[in-house]
Image (cartoon, grey):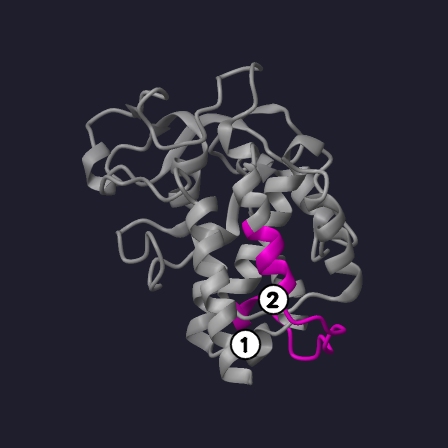
Amino acid sequence: MQAHRAVALAAAATALVATLVGGCGLPSSSPGARAGHGATRVDPTTSTGTGAPAAGGVPPASWNVSPAQVREASAALARLPVKGRAAKTGYARSAFGASWTDDVDVAGGHNGCDTRNDVLRRDLTAIRVKPGTHGCVVLSGALADPYTGRTLAFVRGRSTSSQVQIDHVVALGDAWVTGAQQLSADRRVALANDPLELLAVDGRANSAKRDADAASWLPPNKAFRCAYVARQVAVKARYGLWVTPAERAVISRVLGTCG
């Protein structure tokens, strides 16, 4: 029975991930393709970011969830185990490996660029990259923030980099108490660096979220909530995590408003 359930969850995760990550993968070109002598500017009309305008305008297409995606997310949610939270004993960020390691077997892994910069290059538009880093390190760009709905200017620097942070859509603390502590160390590292699990977002919104699940926190930007909970379901299905009764109820309610 457990083996059958695992197969069903894997199939659900595969179907949902396929519908959610179209256009949301890491940049298809190698980092080296963007290297140059001066700060390299990447044309936002051809980059693999969200496609957001530099200021204001229509929300990115990645905020939208189609009826088919809603159905896939609802079906995957129905297959997730429902349990209470496990004890948080033993939780530490280090349980998920070194922050933003490139030594990981997920999309973008082993490409010569750390995960944080991979996600910045994916999610920001009009980006400029630091010379001599083989097109890896992002110096500046524009973010259509999915959590607040505002457009943010990102500038790399000691006092400015934290204004745009990389969020784990399923917070690692929440992942830990819903099954991740039972995963192998390598699988936890994969979870923490999987592009499906990561979004560039407003730093203050990310700090407000902390380790909350969907029952305790949803993005203030209501236009993104459908995509947000669908992505959480996809992550939990991919990594064999469960949902709490309260979490499942909120995700189901949000999905019921989508499409």
Q: Position of residue 31 (x, y in %)?
A: 25, 41
Q: Position of residue 202 (x, y in %)?
A: 62, 35
110 over 49 or under it: above or below: below
> Quick one: label 2, few (<14), some, or many (20+) residues within 10 Å?
some
Name the quadrant of the N terminus: bottom right
Res 5 label: 1
177 horizontally vs 250: left or right: left
36 horizontally vs 62: left or right: left
In primary-sequence order, the first of circles 1 and 2 is 1
Front one among 92 and 171: 171
87 over 215 or under it: above or below: below
Type of the residue with mark 2: Arg
Q: Which residues are magenta?
A: 72-96
Front one among 241 and 9: 9
Residue corresponding to mark 2: 79
* Mark 2 element type: helix
Type of the residue with mark 1: Arg
**Image quarter of residue 57:** top right
Number of numbered discs visible in the structure rendering: 2
Res 171 label: none
**Image quarter of residue 126:** top left
125 horizontally vs 27: left or right: right
Front one among 119 and 63: 63
Q: Identify the residue shown where x is 62% and y is 67%.
A: 80
Q: Is disc 1 in contact with disc 2, using a CB cutoff of under 8 Å?
A: yes
Q: Position of residue 52 (x, y in %)?
A: 48, 23
Q: Is residue 173 magenta?
A: no
